[in-house]
Amino acid sequence: MKLNILLCDTFPGLLPSYIESYASMFFNLFSSVRPDMEYKIYNIQEGEIPEEIHTDELYLIPGSRAGAYEEIEWVKNLLNFIRKAHASQAKMIGVCFGHQVIAQALGGQVEKSDKGWGTGIRSSKIVLPEALNYFPDGIMNMHYNHHDQVVTLPKEATLFASSEFCPNDGFIVGKHILTFQGHPEYTPEYNRYVILSRGQDEPQEVKDKAMQSIDSLTAMGQEAAHWMTDLISQQ
């Protein structure tokens, strides 16, 4: 199985020393789920984008500090790629910014949320029976780090997870697109680092609550990874 990571940010100077690269977080996530996984990295910000779309491969769009609605050349190129990949029924995964930019590309709407910073571990309610195959208790716990949210889903999308803070927490399109507002690739250690290093301008109450959530809840990144890799076998 081949996973094409369409890297939309390398977070220079923002990763702790124990993380080799942002892409390596996905290598670690998938290593125990699909040890045979092959990877190819495209640096979308540098103009790299797949020239051919293969329906027997996975395309992952991960996080970024950019907004899906920004008038930036590489974002526009990515939006066009998503539309072409969707038309080909290629298997696509969206994580955080990826979730948002797929929604934007397919007719949804993304905005900066007035609810503030989504951080820590949040529990979402599973609202789609298919998702119970991976989250059988009807709850999805995931790491989060976002200010933007999908406020309107694409017409073709079906919601699978929702929370009070983020009503559109994850969606599918057909059998080939799967998105998560959360970060399956995050670890508790890294999420704590993000809160402490990047939360200087955030309310202390938000940071305290986020830290407590990491101590009390267990994120379900591997469950999400199983669903992501199962996409390749769905027709």
Image: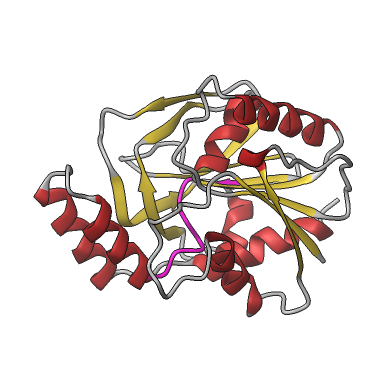
- Relative to residue 56, is residue 104 drawn left or right? left
172 w.r.t. 84: above or below? below
- Relative to residue 208, is residue 32 drawn left or right? right
Closest to the observer: 223 or 87?
Answer: 87
Q: Residue at x 32, y 29 (%)?
A: 113
Q: Is residue 222 found inside the magenta-colored segment of the image?
A: no
The image shows residue 6 at horizontal and vertical percentages of 67, 48
Q: Residue at x 80, y 36 (%)?
A: 85
Q: Quadrant of residue 190?
A: bottom left
Q: Classify the position of the N terminus by image quarter.
A: bottom right
Q: Quadrant of residue 37?
A: bottom right
85 w.r.t. 37: above or below? above
Q: Quadrant of residue 45?
A: top right
- Relative to residue 218, is residue 170 drawn left or right? right
Closest to the observer: 199 or 91?
Answer: 199
The image shows residue 174 at horizontal and vertical percentages of 74, 39
Magenta stretch secondary structure, dominant: loop
Which residues lie in the magenta part? Answer: 179-187
- Relative to residue 51, is residue 211 drawn left or right? left
- Check the image and tell me how it is coloured: secondary structure
Closest to the observer: 22 or 59?
Answer: 22
Query: Which residue of the protein is positioned furthest toward the left in this rendering?
Result: 204
Closest to the observer: 102 or 224?
Answer: 102
The image shows residue 145 at horizontal and vertical percentages of 37, 49
The image shows residue 163 at horizontal and vertical percentages of 37, 44
Q: Residue at x 83, y 60 (%)?
A: 233
Q: Is residue 66 visible?
A: yes
